[in-house]
Each structure stands twice: as structure tokens, then as C-alpha cells.
Image: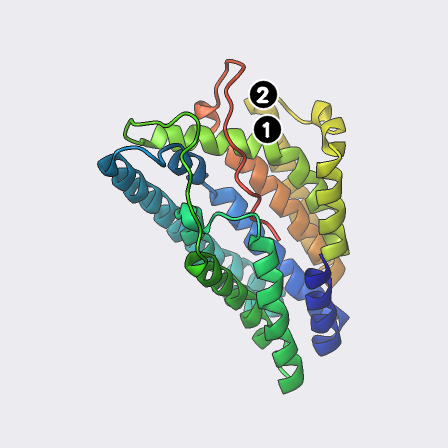
């Protein structure tokens, strides 16, 4: 938390509150696309640690293919979003978006590589980002260059976690069957549905920057988000309406105001709408029976 707060404090000092808010809006838009296209391949890979070599290799290939497809889809969505932002007069946010999105390939690579699955990824993100923005502040970088520094952080995290020595231990139950897309999709929709209430509170607190992020994580640790669970939809139709309502409200807010703070709020609505839309897209794979468990992927959001 301290690293994230310090990073954003340097950004505000370097580019001012308005541009910092626009950068936050662009960063949140990137997160929204990540959540919309996210596929949880790590749980399936972890279940096959200790399986025969051919099974492990096939699982890695499929995981990489799934994440590469998700990345290609997200890049197309980024390009479309840039044009939409230009069309509604948000040229500055549109200009920041591609620089921040430069870090997306590193994130999808991490999703496909269990050797980079670590509880310290956020620590590496903060430690890698702060020196970059400090350098930019010292050199007088403008907001676009600062956005590039934000995108570069993800590559730093990937490199650190990839090179950091780690040992993969087999799980108690090792799966020796070849991985298929249905298993990946099932894991993805279970994780997405389970984390939706947390992501909802986190998105609503986006306007408070890293402080809102810390508050959401604290609430998650104390299970506060379980109090919201009964009010969320539990059927496909409800999820579709929930997601459409969030996207519609976000669009209305962006068109109605267009101020930096309003764009941060709109991006936060897009983020939770995208998380719900991810569940909708994979709904057919959601198990109906109780007792299906999957290890939660470490949340990759900032």
C-alpha cells in the first residue's frame, strides 16, 4: 500500500491532479478489459505439478494459447476504446491508454506461467513502479511518459518473478489428465463469480486511488464483501441486466460530465461491469452442483 500511495503521490506532484485522474481513469479502463477477457489458467496448471511430463507440456501449451487469444482480444478492445474516447472528446485519456496497455502482454504471460504466480506480485509492482515515476518526475516527464512508466511496471514484475528462484510443490491431489478448455473455463467462471463482490467494492472505491484499493483488500480480509453477496444477481438474466446497467450508467456519466473525476467513476463502473460480463460469457461452464472448489488465483488488479 505504501508503495502504491507513494507512486500516485509522485504522479500527482509531477503532472497535477487533473492529469493524474485521467491516468487513473485510463488505468482502470485497462483493468476493465483485463477482467472482461481474463481466463484463470493457473489453477489447472498447479493441479498438474507432479503429473507426467507430456501432460504438463500439453497444459502449458493450452494455457499459453488461451492467454494469447485473450491478449489479442484485449488489444482489439483497447484500439476500439481509444477511438471511442476520441469520439467523446477525451483525447488525453485516449492518448494515455496505449502506453498503460503496453504492460498487458506481461500480465497475460504471467497468467500462463505458474512460475510467476506469487503473493509478492503487488510488492514487485509497487517496487518497480516507484523508481520509474521518480525518474520521470526528476526528468520532467509529462503524463504520457508517466503512463509509459505505468505500463513498464508489469514487465518489471514479470521479469523479477520469472527470474526469482522458486520451487513448485505438487498439490495433494495431482491431476494426470490432459487439460481441456472446459476445465479452464470452469475455473475461470468460478473464480470470477467468487471475486465479483470484492471487485464490486474495489471498483466503487476506485475514486480514492490506492487508499480505496487498500480499503477493499482490508474489507476482503474481514469478509465484509459477504454482506453484499445477497444483493447481487444469481441467475444469468440478472447478471446480464447487472452488467448492462453498469455499462449504461458508466456511458451516461462519461457523456454527461466528462470531467476527470467523472471519467474515473465511469471507468470504475466499466470495470465491475466487465467483471460481471466475464461471468456471463462463461456462464455455461459454471457448475450447478455444490462442493466444487478451485484455488483462488491471486487477484491481479492493482
The residue closer to the viewer here, 91 or 288, is 288
Asked if residue 300 is positioned above or below residue 183 in the image, the reply reads below
Q: Position of residue 4 (x, y in %)?
A: 68, 61
Q: Is residue 290 visible?
A: yes
Count neighbours of disc 2 (C-alpha within 10 A) and say few if under 14, some if 14 to 19, many if 20 or more.
few
The residue closer to the viewer here, 72 or 247, is 72
Residue 193 is left or right of residue 159, and the answer is: right
Asked if residue 143 is positioned above or below residue 63 in the image, the reply reads below
User: Residue lying farthest left?
Assistant: 54
Residue lying at 75% horizontally and 35% vertically, measured from the top left? 222
The answer to which quarter of the image holds residue 24 is bottom right
Q: Position of residue 34 (x, y in %)?
A: 51, 49
- For the residue labelled by badge 1, is the local secondary structure a helix, a strand or a loop? helix
Q: Position of residue 171 (x, y in %)?
A: 43, 31
Residue at image mark 2 = 235
- For the residue labelled by badge 2, is the local secondary structure a helix, a strand or a loop? loop
Residue lying at 52% horizontally and 28% vertically, measured from the top left? 190
Residue lying at 54% horizontally and 58% vertically, measured from the top left? 84
Picture quarter with the N terminus: bottom right
Q: Tag on residue 86? A: none
User: Residue lying farthest top?
Assistant: 289
Residue 135 is left or right of residue 83, and the answer is: right
Count neighbours of disc 1 (C-alpha within 10 A) and say few if under 14, some if 14 to 19, many if 20 or more.
many
Q: How many marks?
A: 2
**Disc 2 to disc 1: CB gap under 8 Å:** yes
Residue 10 is left or right of residue 45, and the answer is: right
Residue lying at 55% horizontally and 54% vertically, measured from the top left? 121
Q: Position of residue 170 (x, y in %)?
A: 40, 34
Question: In 3D space, how far apart are the residues under numbered discs 2 and 1 (Cα atoms)?
Answer: 6 Å
Q: Is residue 209 visible?
A: no
Q: Tag on residue 239? A: 1
Asked if residue 261 is positioned above or below residue 167 in the image, the reply reads below
Amino acid at each position: 500500500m505504501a508503495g502504491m500511495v507513494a507512486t500516485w503521490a509522485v504522479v500527482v506532484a509531477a503532472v497535477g491532479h487533473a492529469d493524474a485522474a485521467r491516468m487513473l481513469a485510463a488505468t482502470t479502463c485497462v483493468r476493465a478489459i483485463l477482467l472482461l477477457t481474463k481466463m484463470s489458467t493457473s489453477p489447472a496448471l498447479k493441479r498438474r505439478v507432479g503429473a507426467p511430463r507430456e501432460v504438463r507440456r500439453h497444459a502449458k501449451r493450452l494455457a499459453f494459447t488461451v492467454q494469447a487469444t485473450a491478449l489479442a482480444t484485449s488489444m482489439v478492445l483497447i484500439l476500439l476504446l481509444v477511438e471511442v474516447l476520441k469520439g467523446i472528446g477525451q483525447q488525453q485519456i485516449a492518448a494515455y491508454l496505449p502506453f498503460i496497455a503496453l504492460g498487458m502482454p506481461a500480465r497475460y504471460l504471467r497468467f500462463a506461467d505458474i512460475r510467476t504466480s506469487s503473493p509478492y506480485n503487488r510488492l514487485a509492482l509497487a517496487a518497480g513502479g516507484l523508481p520509474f515515476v521518480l525518474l520521470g518526475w526528476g526528468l520532467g516527464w509529462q503524463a504520457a511518459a508517466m503512463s509509459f512508466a505505468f505500463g513498464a511496471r508489469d514487465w518489471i514484475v514479470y521479469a523479477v518473478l520469472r527470474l526469482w528462484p522458486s520451487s513448485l510443490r505438487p498439490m495433494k491431489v495431482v491431476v494426470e489428465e490432459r487439460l481441456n478448455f472446459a476445465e479452464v473455463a470452469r475455473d475461470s467462471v468460478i473464480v470470477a463469480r467468487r471475486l465479483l463482490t470484492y471487485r464490486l467494492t474495489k471498483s466503487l472505491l476506485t475514486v480514492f486511488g490506492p487508499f480505496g484499493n487498500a480499503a477493499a483488500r482490508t474489507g476482503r480480509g474481514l469478509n465484509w464483501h459477504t454482506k453484499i453477496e445477497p444483493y447481487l444477481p444469481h441467475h444469468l438474466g440478472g447478471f446480464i441486466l447487472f452488467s448492462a446497467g453498469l455499462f449504461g450508467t458508466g456511458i451516461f456519466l462519461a457523456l454527461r460530465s466528462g470531467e476527470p473525476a467523472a471519467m474515473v467513476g465511469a471507468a470504475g463502473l466499466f470495470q465491475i461491469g466487465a467483471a460481471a460480463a466475464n461471468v456471463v460469457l462463461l456462464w455455461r461452464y459454471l457448475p450447478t452442483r455444490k462442493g466444487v472448489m478451485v484455488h483462488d488465483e491471486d487477484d491481479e488488479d492493482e
